[in-house]
Image: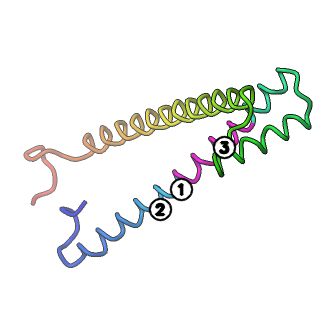
Amino acid sequence: MLGEAPADFYGPVTSSRTTFGQLFSSLGTALSTAVITQLTISGITARLSAAGLTDAAVHTALVGVGTYAKDGTRPDAQVFDAAVAAYRDGFGALMVGMAVVALAASIVGSVLIARASRAVPTSGSGGAPS
């Protein structure tokens, strides 16, 4: 990236790169936190509902999990086990999703690089004079 920029523009180029890096790092953190939170809540709800708890008991359990996250007061074993399993599954689903996104991005990048290298004439192939 720096090799392509004139020396007068090194500062703007490097600050742009840093800014984009910070922006997408922040977005990734925020989005992954929101996704894991929602997957965990829905996983806890599904597990406890399947175990026969009423909606009110599930709500109380979710409040207990929030309290545990905030101040360390551990909920009862059934709720804690459901929360751990739901978090583990939510985190795993997010990682699989990110692997799919990374694979798709690498395929697109490979195709674009291959296309660009075919479009660039090699020296001595009758291209424009240098």
Residue range highlighted in magenta = 29-41
Q: CA distance from mark 1 to mark 2?
A: 6 Å
Are dots 2 and 3 in contact, CB under 8 Å? no
Q: How far is mark 2 from mark 3, CA to CA? A: 21 Å
Does the magenta segment cover residue 31?
yes
- Left or right of 128 on screen, residue 49: right
Q: For the residues marked 1 and 3, what is the alpha-carbon distance in whole angstroms?
A: 15 Å
- Up/down of 31 relative to 107, above or below: below
Q: Quadrant of residue 111?
A: top left
Q: Is residue 6 above or below residue 71?
A: below
Image position of 21 with respect to 28: above or below: below
Q: Residues within 10 Å of mark 1 (few under 14, many from 20)?
A: few
Kind of residue at badge 2 = Leu
Front in this rendered view, residue 92 or 100: 92
Type of amino acid under label 1: Leu
Please state the horizontal and vertical placement of residue 80, each as a whole percent of the image: 69, 31
Q: Identify the element where label 3 is drawn.
A: helix
Main structural element of the magenta stretch: helix, strand or loop? helix
The mark nearer the N terminus, 2 or 3, is 2
Q: Determine which residue is flagged by label 2.
A: 23
Q: Which residue is identified by label 1?
A: 27
Residue 37 numbered tag: 3
> Residue 91: horizontal and vertical position, in percent?
57, 34
Say what amino acid the circle numbered 3 marks: Thr
